[in-house]
Amino acid sequence: MADKNFGAGAGLILVLSMVTAPVTAAQAPQQTCFSTEAGTPTDSRIDACTTVIDASRLPPVSLAIAHQNRATAYLDKGERDRAISDYDRAIALNPRYANAFNGRGVAYEAKGDNERALQDYSEAIRLDPADANALNGRCWLRAAVGQFISALADCDESLRLRPENSNTLDSRGFVNLRLGRWEQALADADAALKINSQNAWALFERGVAKRRKGEVAAGDADIAASRNLDRSAEAEFRSFGVTP
């Protein structure tokens, strides 16, 4: 599946280095906006980044990161259009900001605009060929639109850069399902689940692959487990024509 953990971590060291102890009242919003802590509350990040953006005291590259981080927080809340607006602004401030293109690709994909998403993933990869997240996102969407050979190349490169990633392994499993390669799809799903046993996408893929191999009961058990974890996995696969 396309990464849900694309985040705003890349490029934060530059801005964080501007904040030195002790933290003043003016610096506190910067720390929250630019925090790399996974537990930073979404609404707190949005409020802090809004304060930073409205103050307009940072150079353009740093303001671009603030917009990127707020966009990511909006996307976490399902506010896709507001996220895209912030990604647009981040890119306007820093046209070479690969992470913002990747984030906007995720937002467009969430809206069902696969063509725009593919364009943004491709631009992120052009700017940063080592962007494993963007490569994974493009792999998934290329598989969805039938570009199987290029999809496999993207997944393989993403896994070379970031070897044991459950999301990318299930993306490659999706490609193999679309190609009718049941053994390869099963192997990818198994590998993804060894890394993250709660990966509903990999469970569904494994279930489908098992059913295609004639292991109907085992396949049904995996599909049921996938549904219990996250029904949106099956809904997404069905939208691409992959059914039990």
Image (cartoon, helix red, strand yellow):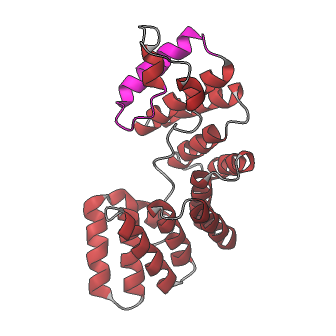
Front residue of 230 and 171: 171
Instruction: Tell me if residue 44 is in the magenta stretch.
Output: yes
Identify the residue shown where x is 51% and y is 55%. Answer: 2
Pinpoint residue 23: horizontal percent, then vertical percent.
Answer: 42, 13
Q: Position of residue 9 (x, y in %)?
A: 52, 38
In the rendered image, is residue 243 in sight? no
Q: Residue at x 46, y 24 (%)?
A: 33
Q: In terms of depth relative to the viewer, which is nearer, 55 or 79?
A: 55
Is 30 magenta? The answer is no
Query: Does residue 225 show up?
Result: yes
**Nearer to the camera, 3 or 144:** 3
Q: Residue at x 34, y 30 (%)?
A: 41
Residue 141, given in percent of the width and then of the height, sits at 59, 60
Look at the picture and state if 83 lies above or below 27: below
Which image quarter is the C terminus in? bottom left
Query: Residue 117: percent from the left, percent from the top?
Result: 62, 49
For the view shown, which residue lies furthest in the bottom direction?
A: 214
User: Looking at the picture, does residue 188 appear above or below residue 201?
Assistant: below
**What residue is drawn where x is 66% and y is 52%?**
115
- 161 above or below 52? below
Q: How many marks?
A: 0
Q: Is residue 103 left or right of residue 191?
A: right
Up-down: is 211 above or below 101? below
Task: Tell me the magenta residue range.
Answer: 34-58
The residue sitting at the front extreme is 21
